[in-house]
Amino acid sequence: QVQLVESGGGLVHAGGSLRLSCAASGSIRIVNYMGWYRQAPGKQRELVALSGNYTFYVDSVKGRFIISRDAAKNTVDLQMNKLEPEDTAVYYCNLHGRSGWSSDQNYWGQGTQVTVSS
């Protein structure tokens, strides 16, 4: 089993910053990448950023968000700057990899709310 625990969400004014943190624990054998997704009300979940053999950012957050991952500790943070009301969503930590002798799969945190007021 793999558990992901997120922290750091909250309410912030537009232009402000928040830092999300995620720690993975359990019988993790292989980690291909870790990242963050978000889901706004009425919208599909979208990939925001991920860190593995390469780093990816969705266009809407480039230049504002920074993902940092500690592979030794299985943690991943998302520094969010210059937040906009459009960033309001539930943010989910994601780990893609293997637990025990399973095949590659996605593991998810419980989600943390980020609300940006205008």
Image (cartoon, rainbow, N blue to C red):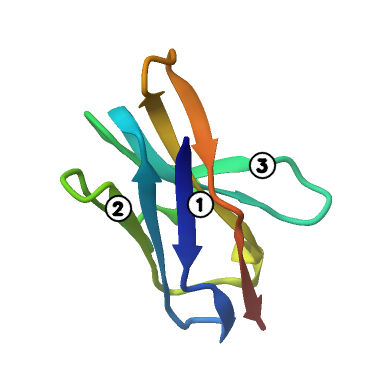
Q: How far apart in space, not on screen, are marks 3 and 1 (Cα)?
A: 14 Å
User: What residue is shown with label 2?
Assistant: 75
Q: Nearer the viewer, residue 47 or 102?
A: 102
- Please state the horizontal and vertical placement of residue 86, each as a whole percent of the image: 65, 64
Q: Residue at x 43, y 79 (%)?
A: 17
The correct choice, above or below, for 117 with respect to 111 in the image is below
The correct choice, above or below, for 10 with respect to 73 in the image is below
Q: Is residue 34 left or right of residue 52?
A: right
Q: How far apart in space, not on screen, are marks 2 and 3 (Cα)?
A: 21 Å
Q: Which amino acid lies under the numbered mark 3 shown in the image of this protein? A: Arg
User: What residue is shown with label 3?
Assistant: 45
Q: Quadrant of the C terminus?
A: bottom right
Farthest residue in the left direction? 72
Q: Is tag 3's residue or tag 1's residue first in the polypeptide sequence?
A: 3
Q: Which amino acid lies under the numbered mark 1 shown in the image of this protein? A: Ser
Q: Is tag 1's residue or tag 2's residue first in the polypeptide sequence?
A: 1
Q: Residue at x 34, y 59 (%)?
A: 77
Question: Do residues under tags 2 and 3 come within 8 Å of each other at their CB atoms?
Answer: no
**Of labels 2 and 3, the one closer to you:** 2
User: What residue is shown with label 1?
Assistant: 60
